[in-house]
Amino acid sequence: MTMSESRPVIKPASKPLTDVKKSLYFHVGLIGVLFILQFVLPAYHHGNLARIMVLASYAMGYNILFGYTGLLSLGHAMFFAAGMYGMGLPMAHLGWTPEPALVAGFVVGIAVSASIGFLALRTSGVSFMIVTLMFAQAGFLTILYFGEWTRGDEGFVIQQAERVMAGFDLSQPANRYNAALILFSLCLIFTLKLVHSRFGRVMIAIRENEERTQMLGYDVHFHKWMAVIMSGTMAALAGAAYALLFGYAGATFASVQYSIFPLLWVLLGGAGTALGPFIGTLFMFYLIDLSSSFTTAYMLIAGLALVLLTLFLPQGLVGELRRRMMPWLT
Amino acid sequence: MADMTTLHISTSSVSRHFGGLIAVDQVDFAVPRGEIRAIIGPNGAGKSTFVGMLCGRIAVSSGEIMFNGKDVTALPAHKRIRQGIAYTFQITSIYGRLSLKDNVRLATSWRWGSDEAALENSIDEALHRVGLEDRMHQMAGDLSYGHQRLLEIAMGISQHPQLLILDEPTQGLADSEIADFVTLIRELGGDMTILLIEHNMNVVMDTADQITVLNLGKVLATGTPDEISANREVQIAYLGETHA
């Protein structure tokens, strides 16, 4: 959405277009920086950044629903795990190669988010939070119940030899980094395209004023449902990629904790900004990483930082940046 | 009253109950195409509930609503809007964190397919008609209350509706703005049917072809402005026995 008012109007159509382009160039530039970083970063941070990009893709999925559509889900771990197990289980038990397994994770993600969305969207507000939380708990318990196949909490390892996709061994750091970067870029560009589309504008309109949006002639329920599906499927893709790149699937990723994480990342980075989820994930990852090197009470430090940020930067890091310097940022 | 072929919107025994409260009670109502119809009545008469049912915001408890000769009773609100009904809220309901232009864009973009130029023109035209074209890049939330009401009306007319429902549009407007509004409604009256819920009797008398008076959820009277102002029942409902 355009936010500036002082720039001269040349012709009506040109203003939003320039802002859209600025935003696009900025984000493509960031992808370029991330590509170059792999050649300069030490091994430890190189590995961290690969992980952060996958988790940020998860957060970007969450952001589609929470940041742009205004629906707060407390059950996204269910979608993350749907992709993780949708991909991991056929690999572990049916001997599938990564390519079809990844497609399976994607399809399971669509199916789970479409059906959960269909049911959960009969509620709104606080009830929607509770219902998504309950569905996710049911999903978590289901994974534990079928421990014979899922190995429950303990989880299962996807062997290095199986993680070869299109000739690339994804357990190799460089391949893993670039695979994570491809996923991250796809999710980021998808988000930007979505936000600038008419469909995305209606999602934002629903966030801003749902009743008005319906009374302007939009099928609000359909738009919300599609937002759940896009959001859940992106989360599922991130879950599948996580298992594939890091060789492990476990029930922890379906727990409440993993539903709360993307909410925190998005809030910290800036809800409703394309870049916010990445910045939030990066920030939180290193906050915990650094503080745990000083003290075992690292969650205390992380918690304090969160409280301070929420108090003084309620729009998140990128949200604040947009407000102060870059009004064209989407 | 006009015959069925020229009727634009009509209801037959439409009712709405909220628990034990009967807000609208078996209302028969008919407006021919192109008419400006004012709906008046004391607070709590059921005016907003009634027009809410016409546009689909509120479901009917019983009865039938016809629009353009078709039964739209079961149609969800967004589909009625796309068939040509526009609605402005009694309590201003705009997108405060979006620009005026983006507000109107949302109102009208579905009408234009991929024709961006036509869309831009219709946005400019709607804002021009209410005199807000100079402010189109401002945040809507920064406008004064009166200007927000005008933005609502701009959003309504940008949809080029066949039927425009305005729920207390002049509430909070300055006198000069009200005069402009009356002119605007008269201009629009040629192109579309207008339903106007209004408390300001000067506005009603200056714009309405016909007036329907609601009281306690029922139609008390329907007639021209002159007939209504001479109607003794209406005077009693409005002013109470002692003043009548």
Image (cartoon, coloured by chain):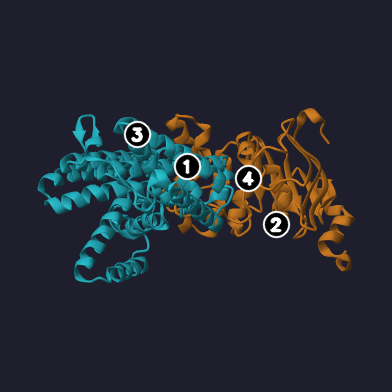
Chain colours: A cyan, B orange
Q: Which residue is mark 1?
A: A113
| Contact, mark 4 vs mark 2 (Cβ under 8 Å) | no
Residue at image coords 16%, 49%: A46
- Does residue B241 appear left or right of residue A57 in this picture? right
Do the residues at discs 4 and 2 belong to one chain? yes
Q: Which residue is mark 2?
A: B200
Residue A188 location (% of width, % of height): 31, 42
Residue A324 location (% of width, % of height): 30, 59
| Contact, mark 3 vs mark 1 (Cβ under 8 Å) | no
Q: Identify the subunit bearing mark 3.
A: A
Disc 2: CA contacts within 10 A as few (<14), some (14-19) or many (>=20): some
Q: Residue type at mark 1: give it.
A: Ser
Residue at image coords 69%, 48%: B58
How far is the residue under mark 4 from the one under mark 1?
A: 34 Å
Q: Point out the frontmost of discs 4 and 2.
A: 4
Residue A138: tell me if it is visible: yes
Q: Residue type at mark 3: give it.
A: Ala
